[in-house]
Image: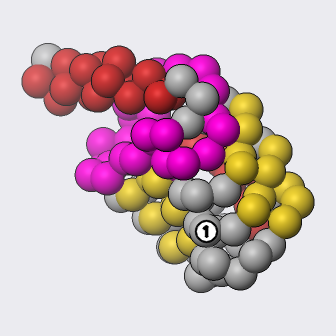
């Protein structure tokens, strides 16, 4: 689902979480606001989730850890706050994670340290 740079406004429709066969969702470079839908936890086949450059707020939902095939998670340049959930450490295939330019940096360093510890210990 490639819907980047379309000038979309409003909240991200929770119904996207019903698209369980989706492999790529790119909603970046729009004007989405509000939280990342909890229904995204249903996207078990998802490999790439790109939500960069929106106005998304709230915290990163721990249910994203259900997307165990996730290779890329791009959340940068939003209004996301809080720390990165420890549950995301379950995403062992994740190779790209962008979370800069948010309300407080989302604790990126803290999560990366947890991931490194998990992989080596």
- Answer yes or no: is residue 69 visible: no
The part of the image, by quadrant, that contains residue 111 is top left
Q: How far from the left and from the top, in percent, is residue 6?
A: 71, 81
Q: Residues within 10 Å of mark 1 (few under 14, many from 20)?
A: some
Which colour style is shown?
secondary structure
Q: Is 29 drawn above or below residue 112 in the view shown? A: below
Q: Could you tell me which residue is drawn at 80 percent across and 72 percent down?
A: 8
At which x and y percent is residue 12? 80, 59
The main secondary structure of the magenta stretch is loop
Quarter of the image where the C terminus is located: top left
Q: Nearer the viewer, residue 112 or 103?
A: 103
Compared across the picture, whether 70 is left or right of 37 comes to: left
Where does the image place residue 73, in percent across and percent down from the top left?
45, 52
> Residue, x 69% and y 68% (percent of image)?
30
Answer left or right for 29 relative to 112. Answer: right
Name the residue: 88% across, 60% down: 10
Residue 102, quarter of the rendered image: top right
Could you tell whether 113 is left or right of 4 in the image? left
Q: Farthest right residue?
A: 10
Q: In terms of secondary structure, where does tag 1 sit?
A: loop
Residue furthest left as drawn: 120
Q: Position of residue 18 (x, y in %)?
A: 77, 66
Magenta segment boundaries in residue numbering? 75-101
Is-magenta flag for residue 97? yes
Q: Is residue 24 left or right of residue 57?
A: left
User: Considering only vertical position in the picture, is 45 above or below 55?
Assistant: below
Q: Nearer the viewer, residue 104 or 41?
A: 104
- From the image, tell me which residue sits under label 1: 29
| Magenta span contains residue 22 | no
Residue 30 visible in this rendered orientation of the protein: yes
Q: Quadrant of residue 13?
A: bottom right
Residue 34 lies, with reference to residue 72, above or below; the image says: above
């Amino acid at each position: 689902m490639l819907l980047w740079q379309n000038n979309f406004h409003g909240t991200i429709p929770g119904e996207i979480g019903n698209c369980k066969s989706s492999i790529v969702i790119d909603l970046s470079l729009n004007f989405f606001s509000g939280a990342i839908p909890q229904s995204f936890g249903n996207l078990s086949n998802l490999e790439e989730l790109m939500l960069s450059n929106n106005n998304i707020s709230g915290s990163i939902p721990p249910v994203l850890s259900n997307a165990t095939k996730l290779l890329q998670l791009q959340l940068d340049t939003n209004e996301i706050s809080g720390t990165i959930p420890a549950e995301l450490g379950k995403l062992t295939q994740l190779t790209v994670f962008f979370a800069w330019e948010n309300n407080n940096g989302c604790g990126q360093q803290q999560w990366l340290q947890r991931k490194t510890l998990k992989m080596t210990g």
